[in-house]
Image (spheres, rainbow, N blue to C red):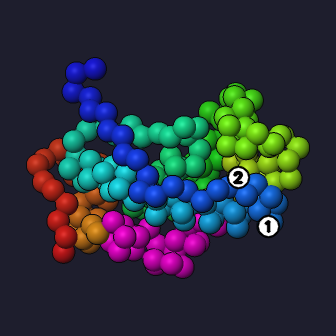
Amino acid sequence: MQGVQNVWIPGSIPPAPIQVSKFQENGGVNAYTAMYLEILEIYAPSFLTALKCIHDARGPVLFHCTAGKDRTSVLASLLLSLAGAPTSLIAYDYTLTRVGVEPNREMLLQMLKLWNKEWTAETPGMSEFVQVRGKFMLGFLDAVQEKWGGVEGYVVEVLGIGKEGVERMRGVLRGEVGREEGEIRDD
């Protein structure tokens, strides 16, 4: 399609092997929190690229991952948080992922078996691992708050975007800033 730029950015390091049994603890919240914090680290270059597109107001940004559940949800939570959405709304938005995941549950389970042929729907922790619950996102956002003082702290500290750049992105996300030239500046 004319005017569409496809960008694929691999993770910076391989993810840790998933231990499905850990998803049994605390209803999956601890394991999801750890996995989503790891996603922030591994996919920081991807998130930075997406945020630069938002900052520069180059037009709509479509982002996705294999299932549209984990990496996609982490980036969506960053954007919603930067726009000023309350955590309850971010968690609700996350739960809407079920709309896309549920019809493809069997296909996704088959994909998971590529990671570990022994996994089945009955594998301890699998039930929690394939769920989409608001408490998973809330646990993750609490951890981001504790570690960096919130999403803005992560964006500034880890991604290296200055506070002025964060404010510009916030304006773009809220529709307060139009399409104009500019680059993210480090304050």
Amino acid type of the residue that numbered disc 2 sits on in the rendered structure: Arg
- Image location of residue 95, percent across then percent down: 65, 47
The quarter holding residue 19 reads: bottom right
Residue bearing mark 1: 26
Left or right: 14 in relation to 83: right
In the image, what residue occupies the spot 46% across and 72% down? Answer: 150
> In terms of secondary structure, where does tag 2 sit?
loop
Residue 164 lies within the magenta run: no
Amino acid type of the residue that numbered disc 1 sits on in the rendered structure: Asn
In the image, what residue occupies the spot 86% across and 53% down? Answer: 124
Q: Is residue 47 above or below residue 7?
A: below
The quarter holding residue 113 reads: top right
The answer to whether any part of residue 77 appears in the image is no
Q: Is residue 99 above or below residue 160?
A: above
Give the magenta part as a residue range. 139-159
> In terms of secondary structure, where does tag 1 sit?
helix
Which residue in the rendered view is the most extreme toward the top?
A: 1
Query: Separation of disc 2 and disc 1 at Cα?
Result: 13 Å
Residue bearing mark 2: 133
- Image location of residue 35, percent across then percent down: 61, 60
